[in-house]
Amino acid sequence: MLNKPFTFLLFLIFGCFNVVLSQELKKDINAHDPAMIKAENTYYLYCTGQGVTVWSSQDRINWKSEPSVFSDAPKWAKEAVPGFKGYIWAPDISFFKGRYYLYYSASTFGKNTSAIGLATNMTLDSSNPLYKWVDHGLVIQSEAGKTNWNAIDPNLIVDTDGTPFLSFGSFWGGLKLVKLTADRSKVEGSIANLTTIANRVDKTNAIEAPFIFKKGHFFYLFASIDFCCRGKDSTYKIIVGRSKKLSGPYVDDKGKLLTEGGGRLVLAGNDQWYGVGHNAVANFEGKDYLIFHGYSAANNGAPKLLSRALKWQNGWPISSAL
């Protein structure tokens, strides 16, 4: 997600806005930092926006706007992150023991004063009487001048023994991994126990949005490098590394460590899509898909929802072309 103040205006222009609720179905939707899940026969999309922007679809082609997760910024988040007004970044959605878990980011531009929170719901169907998001508050936070990492862009991943972990991070000290409590609501132990799983070696350290996906004997760490949110000047691209252990070390196909700037290229922009990134990976009906956003040349650099089939060749993910 964003981390530089000058990108703020561009994000307001091009970002994933809080949409006006409508029964009208749309094929071409704005989306930034998308995460997708299937619940019963419906696909739900969560992305950056005021209160978290939500869409639903029966076919992943035609989308209907849904109520935002939050009607107002969580009080704890406004206290933890001065200046935060409810424009929530980079949600992550998962299902556990009869409830849907949504991790989300609160931050300020240009600083790593940030926080990751958790909300849960028994159903994602807003017409269901049981539909109600319950906020569980702070999971982990970073503070400017006190931590060298940035607590945004969360992604839940469960180890082979069932232990939950949260990956997160953007710029600063790179991508991190931390163990969660069994109920997945808090950090287990001290935040001093963070593991660095990826880093860049240049001065910008332009890496963010980790997403870890288990396939066969490997954990695959996807990440976005270079710069989002600049319209036609966006240079966002998706890389990947793999490890037989969740905690790493992650290496690319050349054996280079992701903590030392490694990363196999999965997808980059072109003349139609200036930059692509902040991906999730999902398996629907037995097939793997890369879910991400791209800055559309046909729409003046606006971020649009994109999805591509993900194949596997010699143990590495191969995305279909843009």
Image (tube, grey):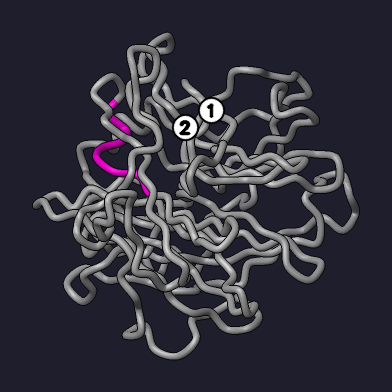
Q: Do the residues labelled 1 and 2 touch (CB within 8 Å)?
A: yes
Residue positioned 77% across, 65% down in the render:
99
Give percent across and percent down for residue 295: 39, 23
Residue 308 appears in which quarter of the rendering?
A: top right
As measured in the structure, the alpha-carbon distance from the residue carrying label 1 to the one carrying label 2 is 5 Å
Query: Which label number is shown at residue 293?
Result: 2
Which stretch did the figure color magenta? 223-230
Residue 121 appears in which quarter of the rendering?
A: bottom right
* Residue at far left of view: 203
SS at circle 1: strand
Give the overall secondary structure of the magenta segment. loop
Residue positioned 58% across, 56% down in the render:
215
Q: Which of marks 1 and 2 is nearer the N terminus?
A: 2
Q: Is 87 situated left or right of 256 in this image? A: right
SS at circle 2: strand
**Residue 229 counted in the magenta span:** yes
Residue 19 appears in which quarter of the rendering?
A: top right
**Residue 163 counted in the magenta span:** no
* Foreground of the two, 3 or 40: 40
Q: What residue type is labelled 2?
A: His
Q: Mark 1 points at which residue?
A: 306
Q: Is 142 drawn above or below residue 110 in the view shown?
A: below
